Image (cartoon, grey):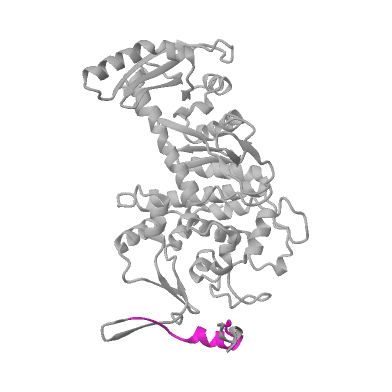
């Protein structure tokens, strides 16, 4: 027998078709056979997508976002409207399908089609291209690239300024109207590039080619997400962004005291000078070490070393403050600097922050010690780390760093879509899950425990009947969340 005749050749088309219809046999369960096949009917693994739709309708997010796009297609031949395309893309992002290629199979999901507003979730009413109800990856790709490619196929361009303003408006609307104090967090995170994207530059800190987007959050609420090239520092373009952000917040929270918080990358004279020129705008920023600052904090460091020795090597912190101005005239004036002199088992650890918050506090407040050196650093500045947790959710759970298109404009659009998806998830958590075990869960945990619910979908003339899994362990939380979200007023023009 020849070697060729002994080889197992791939099945022919007919044998492959027969294999698809055969049951799948697994290990027996005692006397019972364990048999599986693909005859379960119209199913979805994302039963919680209907909760996303309800939050979207309350915010008016996809409908308002659609108004930032210009639809130049011949409407007679259009089967997927711009609001439906955006809902499909954003809901899928929230559900963990960050790549457009995922929609090749996801477009068949009847529950996602229902959430996107498709009249026939099974796609049987499509006139020109019978098949799945939702758009194919190629259609979504044309939506993203319409600002860069001007062909007969790319006819849905968007207005970046309008989308930027919409994100800011929706974020500000989520702030409490009568807030007395609002902390605005700034951060820049390098998003690595894996190709020859437009505007790519090598960044020494990340040791790679990256974009350096500017993120601005208030607590868990996103206000700004701007793609930038990395040949500039983190503070580049922050003042124009703050002008728009502060103006928008002032229109909603007229009497709020605003605090700008960020790491040493944002400790620049132009940012501090701008804050000082605004009424009721303060800053608390990290300050990089230098020989002068270390010398000014040396007495506190010596005290910390002595206390560490007296306590048997226990970590010791001592805080001090002083007026400081750079010798190179990069600062226009002297400012208040708080120094942390810390000694740990690993050695000395000094840190510095600069602020215009008064050490004696504000006159009308009962607590006049909240801005003393120790409390300012430990309670206000160190709380900045929570924003880094928010950005981790953006990157790890929603893949906001997936900058895989060639053009900066389309990568910026992807970042905005991921940020809108995060806003929907955050509103589900805030409006629907408060007081539950998921109230402070990460976005990935909310998705896994609340949205990933098996569901069978039956479509008839009168209704879409969704049968969620009877074995779902968080049924009470799901019911509570649904009741709360259904009670929200719907957005209207």
* Left or right: 36 as drawn, with respect to 75: left
Task: Using the image, determine if residue 279 lies above or below residue 246.
Answer: above
Outermost residue, front side: 1
Task: Using the image, determine if residue 6 lies above or below residue 257.
Answer: below
> Can you give x and y, in whole percent of width and height, for residue 277 in the image?
55, 19
Task: Using the image, determine if residue 252 lies above or below residue 93.
Answer: above
Instruction: Tell me the magenta residue range.
Output: 9-27
Outermost residue, right side: 151
Quarter of the view holding residue 135: bottom right
> Can you give x and y, in whole percent of width and height, for residue 439 in the image?
34, 49
Instruction: State which quarter of the image contains the N terminus.
Output: bottom right
> Can you give x and y, in whole percent of width and height, for residue 164 in the image?
60, 42
> Can you give x and y, in whole percent of width and height, for residue 243 in the image?
58, 30
* Left or right: 85 as drawn, with respect to 97: right
Residue shown at 40%/69% (left/top)?
A: 454
Indicate whether residue 24 is drawn in magenta. yes
Question: Observer-nearest residue: 405 or 355?
Answer: 405
Question: Observer-nearest residue: 28 or 274?
Answer: 28
- Residue 229 appearing in the image: no
Residue shown at 57%/13% (left/top)?
A: 332
Residue shown at 50%/47% (left/top)?
A: 395
- Residue 182 appearing in the image: yes
Indicate whether residue 416 is drawn in magenta. no
């Amino acid at each position: 027998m020849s070697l060729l005749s002994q080889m197992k050749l791939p099945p022919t088309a007919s044998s492959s078709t027969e294999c698809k219809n055969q049951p799948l046999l697994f290990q027996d369960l005692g006397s019972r056979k364990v048999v599986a096949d693909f005859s379960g009917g119209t199913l979805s693994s994302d039963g919680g997508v209907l909760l996303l739709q309800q939050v979207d309708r309350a915010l008016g997010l996809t409908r308002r976002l659609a108004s930032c796009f210009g639809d130049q297609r011949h409407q007679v031949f259009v089967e997927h409207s711009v609001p439906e395309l955006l809902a499909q893309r954003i809901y899928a992002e929230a559900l963990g399908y960050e790549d457009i290629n995922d929609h090749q199979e996801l477009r068949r999901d009847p529950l996602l089609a229902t959430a996107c507003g498709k009249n026939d979730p099974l796609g049987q009413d499509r006139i020109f291209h019978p098949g799945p109800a939702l758009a194919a990856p190629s259609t979504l790709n044309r939506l993203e690239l319409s600002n860069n490619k001007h062909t007969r196929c790319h006819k849905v361009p968007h207005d970046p300024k309008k989308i930027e303003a919409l994100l800011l408006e929706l974020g500000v609307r989520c702030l409490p109207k009568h807030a007395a104090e609002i902390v605005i967090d700034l951060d820049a995170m390098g998003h690595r590039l894996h190709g020859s994207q437009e505007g790519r530059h090598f960044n020494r800190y990340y040791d790679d080619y990256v974009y350096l987007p500017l993120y601005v959050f208030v607590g868990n609420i996103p206000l700004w997400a701007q793609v930038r090239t990395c040949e500039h520092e983190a503070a580049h373009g922050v003042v124009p962004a703050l002008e728009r952000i502060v103006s928008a917040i002032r229109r909603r929270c007229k009497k709020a005291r605003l605090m700008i918080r960020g790491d040493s990358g944002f400790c620049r004279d132009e940012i501090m000078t701008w804050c000082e020129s605004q009424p009721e705008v303060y800053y608390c920023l990290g300050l990089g070490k230098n020989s002068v600052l270390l010398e000014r904090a040396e007495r506190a460091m010596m005290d910390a070393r002595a206390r560490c020795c007296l306590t048997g090597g226990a970590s010791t912190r001592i805080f001090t403050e002083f007026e400081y101005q750079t010798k190179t005239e990069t600062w226009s004036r002297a400012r208040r600097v708080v120094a942390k002199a810390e000694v740990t088992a690993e050695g000395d650890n000094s840190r510095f922050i600069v602020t215009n918050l008064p050490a004696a506090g504000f006159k009308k407040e009962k607590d006049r010690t909240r801005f003393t050196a120790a409390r300012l650093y430990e309670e206000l500045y160190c709380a900045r780390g929570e924003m880094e947790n928010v950005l981790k959710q953006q990157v790890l759970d929603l893949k906001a760093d997936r900058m895989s298109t060639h053009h900066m404009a389309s990568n910026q659009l992807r970042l905005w879509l991921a940020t809108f998806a995060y806003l929907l998830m955050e509103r589900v958590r805030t409006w629907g899950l408060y007081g539950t075990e998921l109230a402070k869960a990460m976005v990935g945990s909310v998705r896994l425990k609340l949205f990933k619910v098996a569901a069978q979908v039956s479509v008839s003339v009168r209704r879409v009947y969704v049968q969620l899994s009877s074995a779902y362990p968080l049924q009470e939380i799901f019911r509570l969340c649904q009741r709360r979200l259904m009670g929200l007023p719907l957005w209207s023009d």
